[in-house]
Image (cartoon, rainbow, N blue to C red):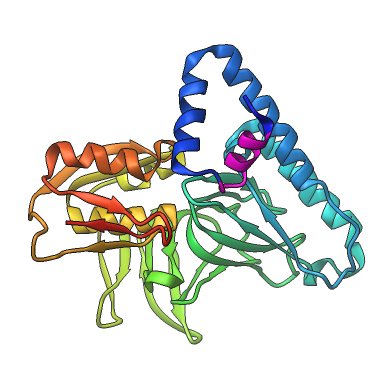
Amino acid sequence: MNKGLLYRFFEGSASVNEEKQIRQWLDASEANRHLFFRERKVYDALLLTPRETSLKQKRKVTLFPWAASTAAAVALLLIVSGLYLFNREDSTKQYNTILVPPGQRINLILADNSNVWLNANTEFRYPAVFSKKNRTVYLNGEAYFDVSKNKKKPFIVKTGQGDIQVTGTSFNVEAYSRFNSFETSLFEGSVDIIKNDTKLVSLKPNEKAILSSNEELVVSKIEDTDEYLWRKGLIAFNDKQLEEILLSLEKYFDIRIQIDAEKLPQHTYTGKFRQSDGVDYALRVLQRSIRFTYERNEETGIIYIK
């Protein structure tokens, strides 16, 4: 396999036909898979190698699928530790920024041992070391948090639609600024949702709060846990309308989908897709259950559903 083609695939610039070529090559033999992951680690290791910068410069790191593995989590922890040592004099002001590519996800451990999963197309900012008063991070996208308990030092997730404050708990937050979406789902402990320094609502385990179209938070029970399977690389839908499914695909794959609403069938779909299979595979599977056609504009990348 041509290394140039592999590296274009790693950086997300490969064409649809090139992606198909690589997937066919991967399926051809186990040796090809070993070579693929070996090259991926080399590519990402080079990408993640720290470069000397001024203490005031903000770092941005783009991470790839291998970063969800245990070895990569250790590597990421070492990188975070390295940044802390390098920036020890100004550590509380140094924020690192992670950009997760479309269709991928990563896992990292923060300085307080909190475990964070980041979904596709997510931007996450976190300090090399937390301040003495709180543990503040910034999210634009979707993340699952398993926060280490510390009652004296609240953990705060800041988003464009509102903030979530906890001391130690497990919860999921979806807050994509592009879609003005905000949803917080609680699994253990408790969380407070705050906006403009005012507490709007407190959640109990197995409750979620969703920002409605009229900018109100609606609290309800969590009925379907499959939608949180994205941590395992799965996009799951349970009795969802096609329009809702297409919106999720837009979020995860950073694409635009235009729908002819008048012709769109009003059927629902239940099923699962692997993020790694890509948006075209998901659409082809949906076509088996819901009758529609689609075409992609190769110049703009927009997908038209009819």
Q: Nearer the viewer, residue 242 or 240?
A: 242
Q: How many marks?
A: 0
> Residue shown at 74%/33% (left/top)?
42
- The location of residue 298, given as percent across then percent down, is 40, 54
> Residue shown at 87%/54% (left/top)?
51
Residue 286 drawn above or below residue 84 = above
Residue 20 drawn above or below residue 133 = above
- The location of residue 205, given as percent across then percent down, is 35, 55
Residue 6 highlighted magenta (yes or no):
yes
Q: Can residue 188 be seen in this view?
A: no
Residue 32 drawn above or below residue 263 = above
Q: Can residue 105 be seen in this view?
A: yes
Residue 116 highlighted magenta (yes or no):
no
Residue furthest to the front: 299
Q: Quadrant of the N terminus?
A: top right
Q: Which of 161 and 254 is in front in this view?
A: 254
- The location of residue 274, given as percent across then percent down, is 38, 36
Instruction: Find the magenta span and give its range.
Output: 4-13
Q: In this view, does 60 lie to the left or right of 121?
A: right
Residue 19 drawn above or below residue 253 = above
Q: In the figure, residue 139 lies in which quadrant? A: bottom right
Give the main secondary structure, helix, strand or loop, of the magenta stretch. Answer: helix
Q: Is residue 221 left or right of residue 239?
A: right
- The location of residue 135, given as percent across then percent down, is 65, 66
